[in-house]
Amino acid sequence: MTRVLSGVQPSGEMHLGNYLGAFRSWVADQHEHDAFFCVVDLHALTLDYDPAALAERTLVTAACLLAVGLDPETCTLFVQSHVPEHPRLAWLLECTASMGELRRMTQFKDKALRDDGGTESARVGLFTYPVLMAADILLYDADRVPVGDDQRQHLELARDLAIRFNGRHGDTFVVPQAALPAAGARVMDLQEPTRKMSKSVSSPQGTVLVLDPPDVVRRKVRRAVTDTETEVRYDPAAKPGVSNLLDLLAAATGGKPAQLAEGYTTYGALKADVADALVALLEPVQQRYREVADDRGELRRVLAAGAERAHQVAAATYERAAGAAGLLAP
Ligand code: TYM
């Protein structure tokens, strides 16, 4: 059976990019594969964060994943820091990765510049983050990693590290593959449609949150930046705003963006339909969220059971890797 693993940072509220780029695939994958999903709290330490809020955000993120449809009886949902093999394997992989290949990671350069004033003052953890991510994946012998387009380069690194480690120490790791959704792999910011929607951009108006009430979703879509023309056409390079709206409509309703464009003569009509589609998409999630988030005891029980299952798999892989790397067994 194919093994699936993916993760999300608890670094802010979940948005439409997370949902369409990743979570929707996770929900489908759990029924077809042996699936592991984690809230990667260790990754959230790589940028400035509020320690007082982290534990709560971790719980809220887990609640959000249950609300979108992950079923803890069907998949394994856990918190990264509850499974100590993640940083342990990351060390073995840090001794496999090179400085040069980590320096090439575009997210490192972007985030270091944005949050830390450049690569010299960035945390070392931000630099080695993709190696921890590789450890997240390789620990579970994952064949398939459902992610949005922005994680493609990190997945390539995970593959390279698995192949290199296997070459040096003998067959140890499964070489994973990224799985991107057909629609929604790169949801763009509604205010700045040339950059991806993200938890950390300064304009909250450009980011639709999974838990935004319907009137807020409608307002954000209505105010989405388009262009000075009037023609509804799918052309991401020349018309990024309109194309993003068409992508969203396609992701929410299942059509093809270029074909959907033919049904519209005004931006207003397109926006109205996008808003309706998004509200309909998010409404059931928001309803379930209220039920799930209120029961903290159950949420913690789910995460404890998940950590136990994850640990069984991770411990066996770590032992295999440590043995292959030549470490003396305790
Ligand atoms: P994170 O927390 O930034 O995002 C979680 C998932 O959401 C996807 N995503 C998007 N998809 C489409 N459009 C967008 N605008 C958009 N923004 C985010 C991401 O691609 C991701 O799939 N490094 C990862 C977390 C991670 C991980 C892992 C993922 C840690 N370990 C192991 C897979 C496997 C991250 O920061 O995702």
Image (spheres, rainbow, N blue to C red):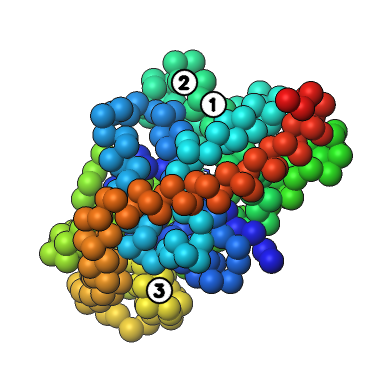
| Discs 3, 2 touching: Cβ within 8 Å | no
Amino acid residing under circle 1: Phe
Name the residue: 28% across, 40% down.
56
Residue 26's x, y, as percent?
Answer: 49, 62
Quadrant the C terminus occupies: top right
Q: Position of residue 84 (x, y in %)?
A: 55, 34
Taking the spot 72% from the left edge, 36% from the top edge, the residue there is 319
Q: Residue at x 32, y 37 (%)?
A: 55
**Vertical placement of 225 versus 247: above or below?**
above
Please give the residue where the numbered disc 3 appears in the rendered image.
250
Classify mark 3: residues with Cα within 10 Å, few (<14), some (14-19) or many (20+): many
Whole-Å distance between the Cαs marked 2 and 1?
7 Å
Q: Amino acid at mark 3?
A: Ala
CB under 8 Å between discs 2 and 1: yes
Query: Can you see residue 57?
Result: yes
* 177 to 59, vertically: above or below: below
Residue 102 coordinates in the image, percent (x, y): 62, 30
- Disc ID at residue 127: 1
**In the picture provided, is 222 more to the left or to the right than 75?**
left
Residue 123 is tagged as 2
